[in-house]
């Protein structure tokens, strides 16, 4: 069980996928000239039927045809339904993740502003380097989150419908297949990309890449916080929450669970993204023989991971305890090393270069994205 999976409940689970596939089939009935109404009905698909068909669409269509007399699914193929349904799930995930990343960004902006003058030791290759500020470190994290938000925005605006029929020709879709596909996309709130993408999987890999980069941005922050929160450093600490971070055997422990889990997500996401690219590279013929099937679990796992990590990151950053006094003391104690590049000195705050200007530039970018937010 993915720790925190409850945070993604109803977004990418099997029931959510069945509901999304139903939405696709209902939208297609409108293209066919009818309007099927199903109310709250959602069929429970027998796993053995899914296995027998090789995908969940045929059992869904069979259940749908037993329930309604109007034509359904005519002219589509299973991949049209499942790919379009996954894009609907992705849309909900991107909305949730982006909302949480905006909260993370807002919290980082506040930290960057509040700690623009909080001097700390900069570290390179694990060793003392030159002085920086915690505000600058928070601003660097903020840049990663803002870049991720920009990429997710672009992907969310361009999620495509899949509509190609049996082999990508739309041969059974009336006199104007292109108009039908465009109408289909409009009913679903997706984009008609101009052609089916049964074996051109860039829509999936672009989605996956954007989600992976969001996890990357959160992972850098979490990994830094894990280092800075070690007892021997003690410059930050996760906020205390009753029941969180305990040990099964050591009563003194308050483990940085959120940082650990966000870091874990960042370590898992790239492999899932790579799986999508591997599947894309093996999408042969007019419909793939296994590569498409291997794509679904990787994509759904990646989407779930991102939802959970972004939600956890909100709590992590909004509750973060920053010990600026510890940072300042350590910087003073290490002044000889931190100021060696300059040739010596005793005041780390006198050697910060453009740190504050960099903070201002990042905060200006945040303000342009959310002008009503005060850093």
Image (tube, helix red, strand yellow):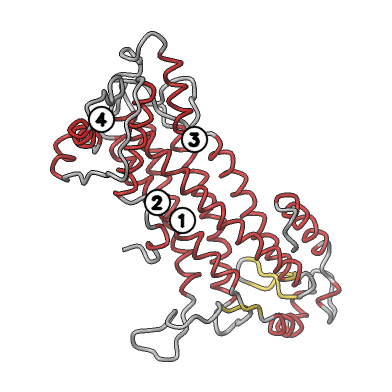
The C terminus lies in quadrant: bottom right
Camera-near label (3 vs 2) is 2
Q: Are marks 3 and 2 in contact (CB under 8 Å)?
A: no
Q: Could you tell me which secondary element the residue under label 4 belongs to?
A: loop
Q: Residue at x 54, y 66 (%)?
A: 222
Q: Check disc 2 and report the residue beneath it.
A: 11
Q: Earlier in the sequence, mark 1 or mark 4?
A: 4
Residue 29 seen in the figure: yes
Give the side of residue 173 with respect to residue 315, left or right.
Answer: left
Q: Check disc 1 and report the residue beneath it.
A: 307
Cα separation between marks 1 and 2: 9 Å
Q: Is residue 56 above or below residue 116?
A: above
Q: Could you tell me which secondary element the residue under label 1 belongs to?
A: helix
Q: Earlier in the sequence, mark 1 or mark 3?
A: 3
Point out which mark residue 289 bears: 4
Q: Residues within 10 Å of mark 3 (few under 14, many from 20)?
A: many
């Amino acid at each position: 069980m993915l720790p925190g999976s409850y945070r993604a409940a109803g977004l990418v689970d099997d029931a959510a996928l069945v509901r999304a596939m139903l939405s696709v089939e209902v939208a297609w009935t409108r293209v066919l000239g009818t309007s099927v109404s199903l109310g709250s009905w959602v069929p429970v698909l027998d796993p053995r039927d899914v296995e027998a068909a090789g995908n969940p669409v045929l059992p869904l269509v069979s259940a749908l045809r037993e329930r309604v007399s109007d034509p359904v699914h005519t002219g589509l193929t299973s991949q049209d339904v499942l790919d379009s349904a996954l894009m609907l799930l992705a849309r909900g995930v991107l909305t949730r993740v982006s909302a949480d990343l905006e909260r993370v960004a807002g919290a980082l902006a506040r930290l960057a502003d509040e700690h623009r003058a909080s001097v700390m030791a900069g570290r390179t290759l694990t060793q003392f380097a030159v002085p920086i500020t915690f505000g600058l470190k928070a601003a660097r994290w903020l840049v990663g989150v803002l870049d991720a938000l920009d990429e997710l925005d672009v992907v969310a605006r361009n999620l495509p419908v899949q509509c190609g029929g049996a082999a990508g020709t739309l041969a059974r879709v009336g006199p104007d297949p292109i108009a039908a596909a465009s109408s289909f996309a409009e009913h679903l709130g997706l984009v008609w990309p101009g052609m089916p993408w049964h074996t051109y999987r860039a829509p999936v890999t672009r989605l996956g890449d954007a989600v992976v980069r969001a996890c990357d941005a959160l992972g850098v922050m979490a990994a830094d916080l894990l280092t800075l929160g070690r007892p021997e450093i003690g410059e930050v600490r996760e906020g205390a929450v009753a029941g969180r971070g305990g040990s099964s055997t050591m009563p003194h422990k308050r483990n940085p669970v959120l940082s650990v889990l966000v870091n874990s997500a960042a370590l898992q996401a790239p492999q899932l993204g790579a799986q999508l690219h591997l599947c894309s590279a093996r999408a042969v013929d007019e419909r793939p023989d296994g590569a498409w099937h291997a794509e679904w679990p990787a994509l759904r796992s990646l989407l779930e991971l991102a939802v959970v990590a972004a939600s956890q990151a909100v709590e992590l950053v909004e509750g973060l305890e920053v010990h600026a006094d510890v940072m300042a003391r350590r910087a003073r104690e290490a002044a000889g090393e931190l100021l060696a590049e300059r040739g010596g000195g005793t005041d780390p705050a006198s050697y910060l270069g453009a740190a504050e200007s960099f903070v201002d530039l990042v905060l200006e970018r945040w303000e342009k994205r959310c002008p009503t937010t005060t850093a």
